[in-house]
Image (cartoon, rainbow, N blue to C red):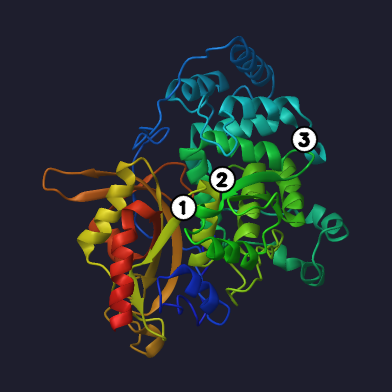
Amino acid sequence: MVQQFSSANFYKDIKSNNPVERLKNAVKKNNKTVSNPINEPVYGEHSLIPYNLANVVPMRTQLDSAHEKQMYTEILAALSGSNFSVSSQDNVQVSKKLDTLLKSGKLLSASSNDNSTTLKNLYDILKTPRCLGFDNVKILAQTVDALYNPTIITQNFGDIPNEVKGAILSSDGVVADVKANPSLMDVEGSGTCVAASVEFHMANKHPAEFARWISGLTSQNQEVEQKVRLDALSQNVLDAVSFLNIFETKQKNFNFEYTTLSLKPDSGAYIRAQVQNDYWDKGERTILDVLMQSTLMQLGSQESYDSLSDIRGGKFSSNPQGLVETEKTFIESIVENNEKLSIRYQKVDDNQNLVGWECDFNKIQKHIIDTLNIGEDVIIGYVLTNETSGKTKEAGYQNTPDNAPNKIINGHEITIVGYKTNNKGNVTFICNDTDDDEQKLVEYSADFLIPKIHHAAYPVSIVEDDLKLIEAQQSAA
C-alpha cells in the first residue's frame, strides 16, 4: 500500500511562499506529495477524537423541535431495522452511535456551507433517491460510521475482482489509458493522502458539511454545490478570480463577493464506488471514501483525476499521482470557506536535498499549537530523507548522490488533531494517518515530527506575520 516516491522534481518549487507566484511557477516546476507512512508509531486508544473538541459556537445536544425528533426517530428506526443495526466497521450498535453523535454535539451541528444540520443531511440521505441504485440505508450507515469514528476513513483502494474487470472495461467513463492497460486499475499505494486527510478533517470538525457532501455526491444529481466567498481564496479579488480560473472550477452565480462551485467526482469514481458497494472488505475505502476523495482530487488537479487508475494530469505536476502543496491549500480554503496560508518550512535545493529550515523548532510548534487551541486541525506534509528512513552509510547503503543522507525520498500528508504536554514541557502530537491500516489515532513526539514537516496550512490570523517575515528574508537572500 506504500507508494514509493520517484519523481526527480519533488518539492523543487521552493522559491516563494507567495501562493499566486507559486501558481505561476508551478506550470514549469513540479512538486509532489505521495503516500508513505512514518515508521514505528505508538498508537493510543481514542474514541470520537477527544482532543480539541471545544467549538467556537455553542453545541446543541437536545432535540428541540418536533421535526428534529421525527427525523431522529425515523433514522434510528431505518438503521435498527436493517442489516446495518450493528456496524461492520466495529460491531457497535447503531443506536449507540446516534446517541453519541447527539450527546457530542455532532448531530445537531450546523457547521455547513448552507447552515443545514448533520441530522437534516442524514435525513435527506435516507429519504431522497440515491444514484446508481445505491441503498439509502447503507449510505446512511456508512455516514454515521464515519462521523462516529473518522479514523476509519482510509485511502486504501481495495482490489477489483477479476470477474468484474471485463464489464468495467466495456462501460462508459473508462479512459483510453485504462482500456489499453487494465493493470492500471490495480492500485496498491494510492496518492490520495491529501484528499483523504481533508475528508477526515471534514468528518472530524465539520460533520454537517461532511454529511451534506455525502448527500449530494450520492444523490441523483451526483454533485455538491459549494458557495465560496472570494475573500476565502485571497483578500485580493483579482487573485481570487485567478485561482478559480487556473483551477478550472465549474462556477454558477459568480459575482465579486462569492461564487458557487459545482463539485463532482470523476466518472471512474462511480465505477469504483459500485465495486466497493459489492466487494468491500474491512480496511478498504467505503463508497463514501471513493466519492469524497475523487471530488477533492478533481478540485485540486484541475478536473484531471481518474479514479480507476489513481492518475492525475493538470498544470502543476508532471508526476501522475497525488496533489502538490498549492493544490492542497486551494482545497482546504474551498472546504473551509476561509483563507488558508501555507508555510513551507523546509529549504530544499535543486537536487532534492534538505538543506535547512525557514523557521526554528519553537516557531513551528507554536503555529501548530495555536491552531489546535482555536479548535482547528492541522494537515501537514512531511518528508523522509535517506537518513530519517534508515538508509545510512552505517546501515550499509553506499554514499552516492542518490543516497546522500539529506536526500528527500518520499512524503505523506497526515492530520494533527491535538497535543499533550508532559511535566517536563515536552509536547506530543495526536495525529490521524489515512494510510496506516489503523482505525485509531497515532502519537508522535514533537521532537520526532517537527523536523520532518515540509509544509502546513493555517488560518491567516495564526501565521500571517510570520509568513511576511519569511518572504522578506527570502527576498533579501
Evaluate whether residue 405 shows in this view.
no
Residue 169, quarter of picture:
bottom right
Figure label count: 3
Where's residue 19, x and y in %? 47, 68
**What is the distance, in whole Å, between disc 3 and disc 2 at their CAs?**
24 Å
363 shown above or below 219 = below
Q: Of all residues shown, which one is farthest toward the right? A: 170
Front-lying residue, 67 or 130:
67
The residue under label 1 is: 436
Q: Earlier in the sequence, mark 2 or mark 1?
A: 2
323 shown above or below 196 = below
Q: Earlier in the sequence, mark 1 or mark 3?
A: 3
Where's residue 79, x and y in %? 65, 21
Quadrant location of the C terminus?
bottom left
Circle 1 residues within 10 Å: few <14, some 14–19, many ≥20: many
Residues under numbered marks 3 and 2 in contact, where contact means CB atoms less than 8 Å apart: no
Residue 191, quarter of picture:
bottom right
**What is the distance, in whole Å, between disc 1 and disc 3 at their CAs?**
31 Å
Q: Amino acid at mark 3?
A: Arg
Disc ID at residue 130:
3
The residue under label 2 is: 283
**What is the distance, in whole Å, between disc 2 and disc 1 at their CAs?**
10 Å
Where's residue 458, x and y in %? 39, 54
Disc ID at residue 108:
none
